[in-house]
Image (cartoon, rainbow, N blue to C red):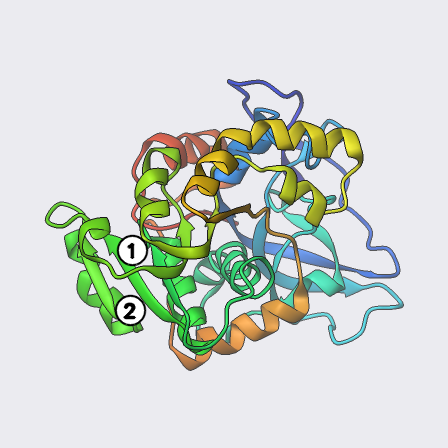
Amino acid sequence: MQAAQLLKYDKNFKLVVKDIPRPTPTDNEVLVRVKAAAVNPLERLIGTGYVKLMEKYSLPVTMGNELSGIVESVGKNVIGFKAGDEVYSRLPLNKIGAFAEYAVIDYRAVAMKPTALDFVHSAAVPLTGLTAYQGFTEVLGAQPGESVMIPGGSGSFGQMAIPIAKEMGLRVMVSGNARSKQSVLDMGAEQYFDYREQNYWEHLEPVNYVIDTVGKKELDHELQVLKPNGRLLSLIMLPNGQFAKDHHMPFWKTALFAVAGHSIDRKAKKFKADYRFIFVRSDGEQLKKITKIVEKHHIKPAVDPTEFKLADINQALDYVTNGHPKGKVVIRF
């Protein structure tokens, strides 16, 4: 079968498409014929070696973190899946491999895909959906009636995060571009700030939580709108010592992450705030809950119209980084 593999960590890495043997599922795995695989900024972080301290792969490794497809066969311990099922998954961190014609996945990381979505749009759901769900429930511990601000929340993350937040009883505020205003309000956001017209930090009442999708350049503004003892969760800034403790990492890794995140922690402390980082994991049971939310709210994630095949994987990666895609970039099989 054809697969796109990383041969070495490099800041200018390129994936190599090559023939490798079709994998055989173990007792707890399903073999999935891949129909679509989403390309994410996470691929860039893995390929450059940026996340080696969190997850270091033995090379060569088949890349790709989320997919949709059809179950071909199942291991003897697999419960709830059979050949022919249409599924999707955020693959386990220690065994990625969505950029291939077939993938073997622990069945506990898999869920039936939303019935109303095709394979391409289904492949755009797992990573952002699980990031939002785990962010709200596990990292923030958000409770009904509390408030969250999502700067830059008009993109693909916001499409999943806003309905999940509303389902949990949270009040949601968002900033983004003008063309997305109505759709975000229709999803349930209470306030929307067009970043070209309004500085949200000058108008927003203090909130319990901020979810950062923009990066360090926005840090001061994000901390400024938090209530005392509020919590800032970043999807893209640096992990810190708390992240390492939450993931039960060894002392030496905890020390390294504490140094890496020190400047952000120090600034958050000045605002009497708590800084957290998330690196989303696979979870089939959570993905089932996300499926219900997608179906209930008729969510159809934005997918960039540019069509990429597996042979175009490096162009797709470059497009994610430099091309301003209009939604998730997806490899079609």
Circle 2 crowding by C-alpha within 10 Å: few under 14, some 14–19, many from 20: many
**Residue ID for mark 1:** 154
Q: Tell me residue 254's x, y (percent).
A: 71, 34
Q: Which mark is residue 189?
A: 2
Q: Nearer the viewer, residue 84 or 205?
A: 205
Above or below, comparing residue 17 to residue 79 in the picture? above
Circle 1 crowding by C-alpha within 10 Å: few under 14, some 14–19, many from 20: many
The span from disc 2 to disc 1 (Cα, nearest Å) is: 10 Å
Residue 153 is drawn in which quadrant? bottom left
Q: Looking at numbered disc 1 in the image, what kind of residue is underneath it? A: Ser
Q: Tell me residue 187's x, y (percent).
A: 30, 71
Q: Tell me residue 168's x, y (percent).
A: 47, 76
Q: Nearer the viewer, residue 91 or 153?
A: 153
Identity of the residue drawn at 41% across and 76% down? 145
Residue 111 is drawn in which quadrant? bottom right
Identity of the residue drawn at 18% across and 50% down? 202
Is residue 271 something that shows in the picture? yes
Residue 123 falls left or right of residue 320:
right
Q: Looking at numbered disc 2 in the image, what kind of residue is underneath it? A: Ala
Q: Nearer the viewer, mark 2 or mark 1?
A: 2
